[in-house]
Image (tube, rainbow, N blue to C red):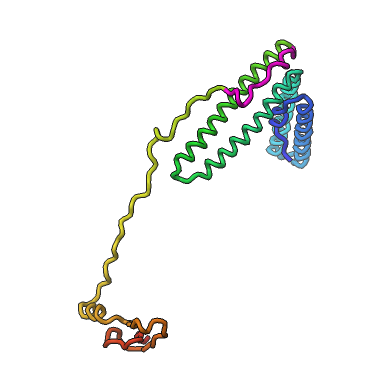
Amino acid sequence: MWVHQAEYRRAVTCDRLNIKFRAWLRFTRCRRQRAFEQSHRCASSNTACLRHAYRQILRIHQRLHAAHREFVHLVDRCDECAPLKLRFYRWLLKQRRRRHRAHLRACACGALDVDCLQDNVNTIKRIQDRITLRRRQVLALHSDCRAQRGAFAATANPTTYSDELPLLPSTPFATLPALPTPATVAATTLPPAPTSAGATSAAAATPVAAVPASGIGQIPKVVMVDQLGQGIPAPGEIRMKKN
């Protein structure tokens, strides 16, 4: 399984940071060892294969070196003020779940349901603005806590849901151009098939199948004829042309 650097970067406490960083370190060293073993399969005359393996090992080694320096910086910031970040991280997970539910509701809105889409988009923007403001506040509190060496941590709690700051107004959908609506399609009448005048009058006067009202529900009689439109069919009779 691939281990990303974001896992130890997002750690809040020092213990979780140490565990996640060691897991990423084992994974990256395994990648470097695998690249080293692949270079052994290259022929001595295949300079392209050897150059590719060397560059891959060099990139992994440089990434390890930079990650060690980053880890030292992150460990230096892990101190007695970590509960501030821990409380913020728990609140952040709740807000992300609320934002995800708003995304799902917006996707479930109809194509032309502007009110439903407007409400969910406003909810998403409010949550995002709230996260941005709260992150800025927590970073400021953490800086003050570090400056006072942990004495500020007991009183500097992040604001609760009821103490949120006012958010910026969002742009309503009413100011946007109207969505195109399906055009009204007029009913069209198909022209009649071109036929001769005699056949047209005969077909209009004498239908091919004439079943009286008294014969509804009865099986009609099928009569095979040489030419349709000759004579008047009897009641309950259907005429069909011979092949």
* Pick the front one: 66 or 74: 74
The reply to whether residue 236 is in sight is yes
Q: Which residues are magenta?
A: 149-164
- Tell me the quarter of the picture where residue 189 sits: bottom left
Q: How many tags in the picture?
A: 0
- Foreground residue, 59 or 154? 154
The answer to whether residue 105 is magenta is no
In magenta segment, residue 152:
yes
Name the quarter where the N terminus is drawn.
top right
- Residue 83's image quarter? top right
**Residue found at x 67% / y 25%:** 88
Residue 187 against residue 197 in the figure, above or below: above
Residue 69 in view of the camera: no
Q: Residue at x 52, y 37 (%)?
A: 120
Residue 216 in percent (x, y) is at 39, 81
- Please name the residue shown 27% across and 71% down the image: 193
